Image: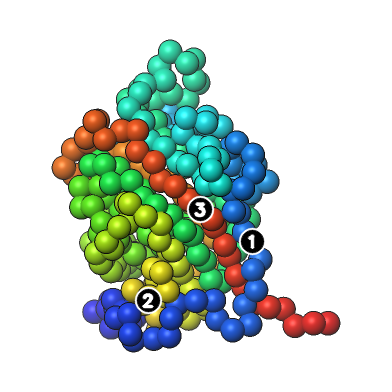
Amino acid sequence: MLLALLTVAAVPATAVEPHRPPAGYELVFADEFDGGSTPDPRHWLYDTHRNAQGWYNNEKQYYAAARPENARIEGGRLIIESRRESLSAAGLRDFGGQKYTSARVISRAATTYGFYEIRVKLPCGRGTWPAIWMLPADPAVTWPEGGEIDIMEHVGFDAGVIHHSVHTKAFNFARGTQQTASHKLPGACTGFHRYQLLWTPTRLVFGVDDAPRFLFDKKRTGRDRWPFDQAMNLLLNVAVGGDWGGRKGIDDAALPARMEIDYVRVYQPRKPAK
């Protein structure tokens, strides 16, 4: 009966207008990754908080902070690279015994609503799990009450299949009720594609290369079904293994594997002149 409360559907590419910033939206944030050698600390933070305990979903990676091997600027792109290596001899206070390293960065800026576009080339090695997603900025808000917006997820054992998902208290993978659309994207791991989200007070529309792919509409009030009226941060990461990403094992020969981010752009409605 939960599905009766929301309209959730995969969206044919011809169903709505091309998935671009609506008229009257302006660019409010962009990182083109054109300078420096590591992610700009004015824009990005490293998330390392679960290294010692082990990461969610039984993932196998250690998320390093400010380590160029795992996160660096190269050729005008942000490279997030997962590697088969252990940092046990590095004297890290938060080392949790992991045999893989990677990076997970979070935007310093938090936004509420807007149009988001991230141009990316994905890794396809078995066991890799890259994601572009959003979580609430308020650290006191716990999952899944605060919601999660997965603009893009990809698991290497199912190469070239893109997943867009929404998680809330009513709709989440722990209950088997998460709302997801999946589709094949030729060239996801050999070329760049633009992963897009239009977030309004009543709708989430996910797209790739201007084609709408997944629609999640708000039909009733209630935080358990629509918590998406709060500021959220953008996350970029490549996990290794885990309950989903590692379902068919990890191909160590495929590592190192990198997600290359060409740019991140955020648009919001233009404020009226005073």
Three-letter code, disc 3: Asp
**Nearest to N terminus: mark 2 or mark 3:** 2
Left or right relative to 91: residue 231: right
Who is closer to the viewer here, 166 or 267? Answer: 267
- Residue at the (50%, 21%) spot, across then down: 93
- Residue tagged by mark 3? 262
Secondary structure under tag 2 reads: strand
Q: Which quadrant, please, contains the N terminus?
A: bottom left
Residue 49 to residue 113: above or below: above
Who is closer to the viewer here, 247 or 161? Answer: 161
Who is closer to the viewer here, 96 or 262? Answer: 262
Q: CA distance from mark 2 to mark 3?
A: 21 Å
Who is closer to the viewer here, 132 or 94? Answer: 132
- Residue at the (52%, 31%) spot, across then down: 68
Q: CA distance from mark 1 to mark 3?
A: 14 Å
- Residue tagged by mark 1? 29
Residue 266 to residue 13: above or below: above
Quarter-of-image position of residue 95: top left
- Residue tagged by mark 2? 212
**Nearest to N terminus: mark 2 or mark 1:** 1
Three-letter code, disc 1: Phe
Image disc number at residue 46: none
Residue 118 on image: x %, y %: 48, 60
Three-letter code, disc 2: Pro
Left or right relative to 90: residue 271: right
Q: Residues within 10 Å of mark 3 (few under 14, many from 20)?
A: many
Q: Which quadrant, please, contains the C terminus?
A: bottom right
Is residue 85 visible from the viewing direction of this image? yes
Residue 233 on image: x %, y %: 54, 56
Marks 2 and 3 close (CB-CB < 8 Å): no
Quarter-of-image position of residue 153: bottom left
